[in-house]
Amino acid sequence: MRLLFLVFYGFSESNGISKKIRYQIDALRQGGLDVRTCYYEVRPDGHRCWMVDGTLLADLGSGLVAKLRKRMDFSPILRYMEREEIEAIYIRTYHNANPFTIRLVKRLKARGIDTILEIPTYPYDQEYQSRSEKLQLAIDRLFRHRFCRYIDRIVTFSDDTEIFGRPTLRISNGIDFRHIALRHEPPSARDGLHLIAVAEIHFWHGLDRLVEGLGRYYSRQPDYPVYVHLVGPLSGPREEQEILTPLHRYGLEQVVTLHGPLHGAELDALFDRCHLAIGSLGRHRSGITSIKTLKNREYAARGFAFVYSESDADFDHQPYVWKVPADESPIDIAQLVEFYRQQSLSPPAIRSSIAHLAWSEQMQPIVQYLLSAHRHE
């Protein structure tokens, strides 16, 4: 079966979402599908292009007209699918339901193309904060139910059996173990505990709770030092204020390091210096109580014990996980230190506990659905 995997933006080697999409595509191919990847790219000369697997599909030009064409004109994609006899499409949502994307999926439906929509985070309304984001969300909310009329199945990492009136395929975020390095044995924590959090830092990651907790910990003049390594950009003014304000107020500049984005060998080396990983601590801020984040799985694949606040059925009962309350309380660093001291599982043991979360297994329900739907046509 020939499938087009459609992404409304480009790829970045240091971006975790880009890596995830590559792993998903590889897993679909392992399942026997002929997958082509269509994505949007802005070239150095300012030209906006639709690409398929590194080959130019359509040059939309530059400037305002090109920006509008990107949002309104999907005819190059439709022509490609007809020419290549594409039988199914997997769309990664950009929360961009509007009359133009509705026309796209309506035409796909009319041609008998199986259409799957992935919604990585659900619900997502409260993740939109800026004025421009809220405008995009308002348009999406106006049209998303009509858009989903032409969707056959929605892939979700939540526990929902139906979203926007359409049945779901429920999976977990997966792991491609070939691309995630297993950490070395943890260094001695005798002289201090090193915590690491890797994310494009948004308010729903709740890392301000960690910094505030660290400030309160040091205000009691402890004998045992704790260090925090934040890896990734602070995504906006709100995040800068929430992280930097307590950092400066408590004078934590010597124990909190803002590394910015890291990837590859540089990130692996930093992981090997650290003892414990920090997941999301504020998903409740965006109205989410249950989610299966990619980051939790990456930490486990590296062999780390870690901390988070949401519900994640794959990890909630694991001995190497410390769940903190899903509220605004500062993280109790003394308790966190004690949790780490009680850990006994080796990195290989932690990694082996999630063997079933390989992408090749997680994408199987999608492969099976598509092949079954195709057989019954």
Image (spheres, rainbow, N blue to C red):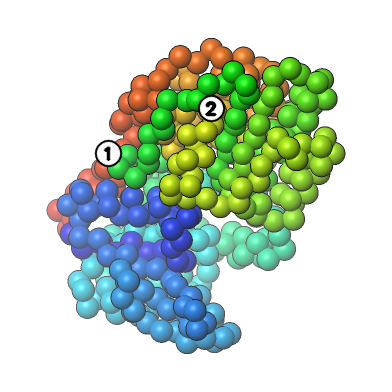
Which residue is denoted by mark 1 in the rendering? 361
Q: Is residue 304 visible?
A: yes
Q: Residue at x 82, y 35 (%)?
A: 250
Q: Residue at x 43, y 58 (%)?
A: 13
Viewer-nearest residue: 179 or 208 = 179
Question: Crowding at label 2, few (<14), some or many (≥20) Cα neighbours within 10 Å?
Answer: many
Is 278 placed above or below 130 here?
above
Q: Residue furthest left?
A: 375
Which residue is denoted by mark 2 in the rendering? 275
Q: Position of residue 294 (x, y in %)?
A: 46, 41
Question: Crowding at label 1, few (<14), some or many (≥20) Cα neighbours within 10 Å?
Answer: some
Is 266 placed above or below 301 here?
below
Q: Secondary structure at mark 2?
A: loop
Viewer-nearest residue: 10 or 134 = 10
Q: Residue at x 54, y 31 (%)?
A: 274
- Quadrant (top left/top right/bottom left/bottom right) for the C terminus: bottom left
Q: Residue at x 36, y 28 (%)?
A: 351
Count of residue discs: 2
Sequence-wise first label, 2 or 1: 2
Q: Secondary structure at mark 1?
A: helix
